[in-house]
Structure formats: structure tokens, C-alpha cells
Image (cartoon, helix red, strand yellow):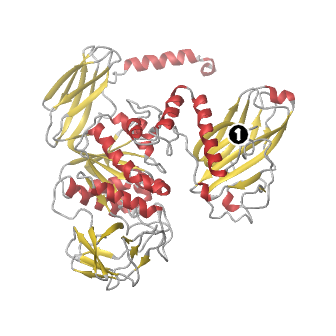
């Protein structure tokens, strides 16, 4: 009984007293027990104190002082130090506040980022039980940044972070690619390694770039302006974005105003063609399992439409629209007015409806759902689809529902700039910007799967991202890029491939950057699994690239690299460099997967190839005048050209010199 009568005010007072009894936090969360700091570079340390407080920082044999600004923020820079430890980092405020961080090591620190193949944890990777059992390593440590988004750049992380030491109790949830990289690198570089892991599955490259970097590119200004509006007025930003979405639809469909699918007076049934409204199955659910619909392998956009009837009293007050779980993106209209757009893998949707939006009689609800991975549409389970009026019981939205396919030629609509994985700068703002000028030796980047539908822009974006992060972390920051592995249908004829185009964009971006290295993984993916389990080889190849690019070892960084292609009589000669030993072809005397192409679309054809020392000779078919050579150009090609060290030649496209 006493507990029930205990007031929330008294409980809050006890919490406040407890907080006062604790030592104030002076050091930023990056600087805590078990951290690894970058050796041989000036060491930036920062934190929060009382306004104008004098803070003294001590570490190893160095001491520095700073005065906090009016907001309480302070920072100091300690001199470069060589590898070693453990040390204690101490921050002492003039008010008497004090904080220490123990077991700090000096070594090399790497930032690991990207999407799901970087995020995949050790426990889900291959041979996980054995790897976890044997993972203990006091000099290998990781800090994982949890998912967060922000429309503006943050100074501090939204969620707690902690440094962990490699051990069977910690490693299962670590990024597998990042962990195996660090473990492999320590076989050659005998210093402590700190790994900061900040990634998000399914993310495009653009959310990982700063607003300044995106504004320097072309075409992102209006969306960034909408994002800035969202930070101040989310409702106004939603309305502005809806106008952009609707303009996109009209540009693709040719629909005039009033004839769009969301318009309440647009006909529900049209002619029986590929974009006609059709009856949806009761209960809806994942469209891949609708009987007789032929949507088993469909990815893309589908319209959904239904009606519901209200009394005058039900329509008068504000209401809430609950749509249950939808995968992945919805744009939703009620009575022709856009009310919201949400991204989420099976996430539930709930939208407030302002007074005046509904009316007595029949109301029209229209949803456009986009899914390019996993289940599609308005899923089963979760909160029942219903309209909750201001008073009275909910009104079930059980249909009948109709649906309408969107032609694939329309492509995908714009995504909200404040979205997590498909927006602009949101992940950078919350998951990279708070790292501020923390010291890093290099960055590992494993991303691109979500850009395979727009590969033509990827090289420029990756180049801009590398420059962007170097502005934050220093011009000498090295980048180690994982080239996308094999995934998807295996080719039976030459064709175009978004996956191959992104691989080429990654290759070109790295080739034009003296501080970047490429880890080729075309042979360690899985044609049937977007998340291949073999992350050990990914780590090994990243470590090999680091040894060459960062530490200057005279080893081939990533396997045979094409240097050029030249027409000689009836052959095209492709020269290779960075060969370990000699070129070899697996399982046959000659390599496969080479194509010669003309300038016209569809002109590529497979050709016979043979190895001669450091060259591959391609036979030019009679009557053709090829201008390009491509190798392993497909989503999931079979690639057989390697060198004696066991490293594959990566996919490429080259112009042929006369």
C-alpha cells in the first residue's frame, strides 16, 4: 500500500539526489575505460563541464588545460605519442569535478561503416561458434555506435556507447568484417587496434554524407532545404515532400491533376490492363503469397485503395489512422490529401488526421507501398488496420481493398530526406558527426548494395564521401573499400548489371585515390544470399589492402589489376599488374567471363581468352570492331582468373586503345 501512495514527485527527487551524488561526467563518451587512441598523431580530447569552468586533462606524461565555453563544452589537444599502455586518462574541473578512464591503449584506430554486410555480427557469420570461442584478445577492442538519425549534425551520440575488449562474451555482436580485419591486421602490425563500428543495414551512401558534401554535388539542394524545414516543422516538411512525390508520379505516369490514383474521384476500376485496379485478397498480407496474383518475385511499387464510411459525429473531430505493419516505404493519402510517408522494415504506421480532413459519408484511403527487399505491402499481424475517431470505437479498415501495379519502367519515387537508410545526411549527422575529430588511421567502407539501381552516380558519391570524411578526420585518412561480392542471377549471356556497375564505380574511385585500397570479394559471395557468411576472407583482404596502402608493404594490395587494353591485329591484349607470382585460370586452361563490346547497347559478346605471362589475349570475332572489354560483368558472375597467391582479378570495364 505504501508503494501505491508513494508520489512520483518524491521518486523524482530521489533520482535527482542520486544524480547529484554521482561524479559529474566531464569526458565525452568516446573517452572511457578500455578505449584505444590513435598513436603518432595529436590526440584530441573533449567533454562537458560547467560554463566557463577550467578543465585540466592528464594522460601518460602529458597535461593540457582548457576553459569551457558558455555552453560548458571544452576540448584540448595532447601531443602525439607512440604505441603503448595501459594508461589512465583524467579530467579535473576547477569546481572539483573529476573523471578518470582506465586501461587506455595507444595503437591504431579504424572506422568501420556501411550497410548490412558491414553490420552482420560474428554470431551470424560462418564458423561462428569456433571463432567466438577463440576470440579473446586484450589488445583488440571495439566501440559500436547504435542506430540513430538526425536532420542536423549532432555533437554527441543519441545513445550510450562503450568500448569492449575482444572476448567470447563480447565478440558475438561485433561486426564480423570489422573484427576479422582487426584480427588479421594484428598478425602483421603488432600494436593495439581500436575499431569503431558505425553502420546501418540497407543504407544508401547519401545518408552517410554531410549536408555540405551533398550541397556541393548536383541536384540535392531542394531536398536538403526540405530536410532543414523538417528540423523546424515536420508537418510542413511532410506537405512539401508530398508535393515532390506527386510531381514525380505525374512526370512518370502522365496523369493530369484529378486523375492520379490518390484522387478520391479517380475511377477505382480501369481497363483490364497491367495497371488496372484489381481486387486484393481479404486480409491483404505479404503480396508474395497472394494466391494466383503472380507476385512471388515482385519488387517495386503497388497502389492500395479502400473506402470507409463515417457519420457526421465521427468525422468532426481529429482522428488517428492505424495501418499496421508495412514493408518498406509508404506514401499515404486520405481524401486526396497526403498525410505521411514512413520507412521501416515491417514497421507499423500510425498517422494523426487533423479535424476537417474527414467528412460524413464515404472517405477514400490510398496507399502507395514500395518494397525492394523481403515481404511486400500491407502485412498481416500487428495493430489492426483501423481508423480511431476522436471518440467511440475504432472503425475497422477491412476493405474491400483493391490494388494496382506500378510499371517497373517508372523506377522508384523520391525518398524523404529525413529517412534513415534512404534519406540525406541523416546517418552522418547522428552516427559520424559526433565522432568529431577523433583520431583514426583509416576507414573501412562496405556499402553499395542499396545503390545498384543508380550505379551511374556512385563513383562521384563515393569520391565525395571520402573527401567529406577527410575534412572531418584529417587529410591522411586512408580508405579501404570492399568491392561488392557476387549475388543474384548467374549470367547465361552478356547483359547489363547494376551490381557490376557499382563494382566498377568502386574500382574507379579507389584507382583515382592514392590513399585508398580495394578489397575484391567477387569469389567469396553467395549467389543466393545477400549476406554471405564468409566474412573471414573479407577481413583478410581488407587487412592486405591496409598493409599496402597504409603501412607501405610491397605486396599486391588486392590481386591482379587491369592496366590497359590494346587492339593488336585480331586480338585485344589486356595487361595486368599487381600479380602475385603469375596469372592462372581455375578449372580450365583458359579464363572465362571476358566480353568484347561495341559502342551500341547490346553489342557485348563472350570471347575466348588465353593467358600469356602478365597478359590476357582476347580473340576478336570476325566482322566486329570492339571499343570496350568487360570482365565478370554480371550480378553473380563465375570468375576464374586469379594469381598464384590465390587472389582474384576483380570485375572491370576498360576502353580499348587502338
Question: Residue 354, relative to residue 585: is it above or below?
Answer: above
154 relative to 502, above or below: above
The quarter of the displayed image where residue 363 is located: top right
Q: State the image quarter where residue 163 is shown.
A: top left
- Label count reads 1
Identify which residue is drawn at 29% across, 33% down: 31
Where the N terminus falls, by quadrant? top right
Tell me which residue sits at (57%, 51%) in the image.
412
In depth, the one of 68 and 489 nearer the eye is 489
Give whichever of 315, 160 is nearer the camera.
315
Image spot of residue 634 (x, y percent): 45, 69
Q: Quadrant of residue 343?
A: top right
> Which residue is label 1 attached to?
333
The reply to whether residue 135 is in sight is no
Residue 570 coordinates in the image, percent (x, y): 31, 83
Please indicate, yes or no, whether residue 548 appears anywhere in the rendered image.
yes
Q: Which sits in the foreground, 72 or 26?
A: 72
- Give me the residue at 57% from left, 55% from top: 372
What kind of element bears circle 1?
strand
Residue 519 % position (x, y) = 31, 60
Other-residue count near label 1 (Cα within 10 Å), few / some / many at <14 / 14–19 / ≥20: many
The reply, left or right, for residue 285 in relation to residue 52 is right
Left-right relation of 263 to 213: right
- The image quadrant where one finds the C terminus is bottom left
Give the percent coordinates (x, y) of residue 651.
Answer: 36, 67
Amino acid at each position: 500500500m505504501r508503494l501505491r501512495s508513494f508520489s512520483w514527485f518524491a521518486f523524482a527527487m530521489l533520482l535527482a539526489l542520486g544524480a547529484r551524488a554521482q561524479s559529474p561526467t566531464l569526458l565525452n563518451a568516446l573517452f572511457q575505460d578500455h578505449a584505444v587512441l590513435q598513436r603518432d598523431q595529436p590526440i584530441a580530447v573533449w567533454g562537458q563541464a560547467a560554463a566557463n569552468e577550467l578543465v585540466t586533462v592528464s594522460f601518460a606524461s602529458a597535461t593540457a588545460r582548457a576553459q569551457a565555453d558558455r555552453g560548458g563544452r571544452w576540448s584540448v589537444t595532447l601531443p602525439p605519442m607512440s604505441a603503448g599502455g595501459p594508461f589512465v586518462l583524467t579530467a579535473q574541473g576547477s569546481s572539483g569535478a573529476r573523471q578518470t578512464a582506465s586501461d587506455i591503449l595507444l595503437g591504431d584506430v579504424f572506422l568501420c561503416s556501411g550497410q548490412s554486410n558491414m553490420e552482420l555480427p560474428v554470431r551470424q557469420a560462418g564458423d561462428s561458434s569456433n571463432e567466438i570461442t577463440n576470440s579473446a584478445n586484450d589488445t583488440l577492442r571495439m566501440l559500436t555506435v547504435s542506430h540513430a538519425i538526425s536532420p542536423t549534425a549532432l555533437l554527441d551520440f543519441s545513445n550510450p556507447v562503450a568500448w569492449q575488449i575482444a572476448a567470447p562474451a563480447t565478440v558475438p555482436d561485433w561486426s564480423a568484417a570489422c573484427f576479422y580485419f582487426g584480427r588479421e591486421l594484428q598478425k602483421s602490425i603488432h600494436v593495439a587496434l581500436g575499431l569503431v563500428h558505425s553502420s546501418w543495414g540497407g543504407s544508401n551512401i547519401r545518408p552517410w554524407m554531410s549536408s555540405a558534401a551533398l550541397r556541393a554535388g548536383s541536384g540535392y539542394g531542394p531536398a536538403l532545404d526540405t530536410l532543414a524545414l523538417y528540423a523546424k516543422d515536420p508537418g510542413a516538411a511532410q506537405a512539401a515532400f508530398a508535393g515532390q512525390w506527386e510531381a514525380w508520379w505525374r512526370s512518370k505516369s502522365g496523369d493530369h491533376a484529378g486523375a492520379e490514383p490518390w484522387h478520391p474521384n479517380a475511377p477505382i476500376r480501369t481497363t483490364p490492363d497491367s495497371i488496372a485496379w484489381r481486387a486484393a485478397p481479404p486480409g491483404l498480407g505479404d503480396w508474395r503469397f497472394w494466391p494466383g496474383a503472380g507476385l512471388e518475385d515482385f519488387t517495386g511499387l503497388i497502389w492500395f485503395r479502400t473506402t470507409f464510411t463515417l457519420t457526421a459525429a465521427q468525422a468532426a473531430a481529429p482522428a488517428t489512422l492505424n495501418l499496421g505493419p508495412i514493408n518498406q516505404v509508404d506514401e499515404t493519402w486520405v481524401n486526396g490529401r497526403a498525410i505521411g510517408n514512413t520507412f521501416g522494415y515491417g514497421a507499423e504506421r500510425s498517422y494523426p488526421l487533423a479535424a476537417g480532413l474527414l467528412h460524413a459519408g464515404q472517405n477514400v484511403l490510398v496507399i502507395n507501398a514500395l518494397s525492394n527487399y523481403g515481404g511486400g505491402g500491407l502485412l498481416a499481424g500487428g495493430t489492426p488496420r483501423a481508423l480511431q475517431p476522436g471518440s467511440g470505437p475504432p472503425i475497422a479498415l477491412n476493405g474491400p481493398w483493391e490494388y494496382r501495379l506500378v510499371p517497373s519502367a517508372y523506377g522508384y519515387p523520391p525518398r524523404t530526406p529525413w529517412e534513415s537508410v534512404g534519406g540525406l545526411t541523416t546517418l552522418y549527422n547522428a552516427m559520424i558527426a559526433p565522432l568529431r575529430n577523433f583520431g583514426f588511421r583509416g576507414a573501412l567502407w562496405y556499402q553499395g548494395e542499396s545503390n545498384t539501381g543508380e550505379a551511374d552516380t556512385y563513383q562521384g558519391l563515393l569520391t565525395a564521401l571520402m573527401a567529406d570524411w577527410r575534412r572531418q578526420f584529417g587529410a591522411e585518412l586512408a580508405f579501404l573499400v570492399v568491392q561488392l561480392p557476387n549475388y543474384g542471377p548467374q549470367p547465361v549471356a552478356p547483359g547489363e548489371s547494376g551490381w557490376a556497375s557499382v563494382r566498377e564505380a568502386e574500382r574507379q574511385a579507389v584507382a583515382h585515390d592514392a590513399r585508398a585500397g580495394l578489397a575484391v570479394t567477387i569469389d567469396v559471395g553467395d549467389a543466393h544470399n545477400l549476406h554471405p557468411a564468409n566474412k573471414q576472407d573479407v577481413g583478410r583482404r581488407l587487412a592486405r589492402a591496409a598493409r599496402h596502402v597504409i603501412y607501405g608493404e610491397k605486396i599486391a594490395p588486392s590481386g591482379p589489376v587491369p592496366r590497359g587494353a590494346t587492339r593488336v591485329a585480331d586480338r585485344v591484349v589486356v595487361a595486368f599488374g599487381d600479380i602475385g607470382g603469375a596469372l592462372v585460370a581455375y578449372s580450365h586452361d583458359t579464363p572465362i567471363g571476358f566480353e568484347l563490346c561495341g559502342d551500341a547497347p547490346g553489342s557485348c559478346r563472350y570471347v575466348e581468352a588465353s593467358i600469356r605471362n602478365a597478359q590476357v589475349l582476347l580473340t576478336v570475332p570476325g566482322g566486329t570492331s570492339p571499343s570496350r572489354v568487360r570482365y565478370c560483368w554480371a550480378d553473380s558472375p563465375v570468375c576464374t582468373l586469379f594469381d598464384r597467391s590465390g587472389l582474384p582479378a576483380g570485375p572491370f570495364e576498360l576502353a580499348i586503345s587502338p
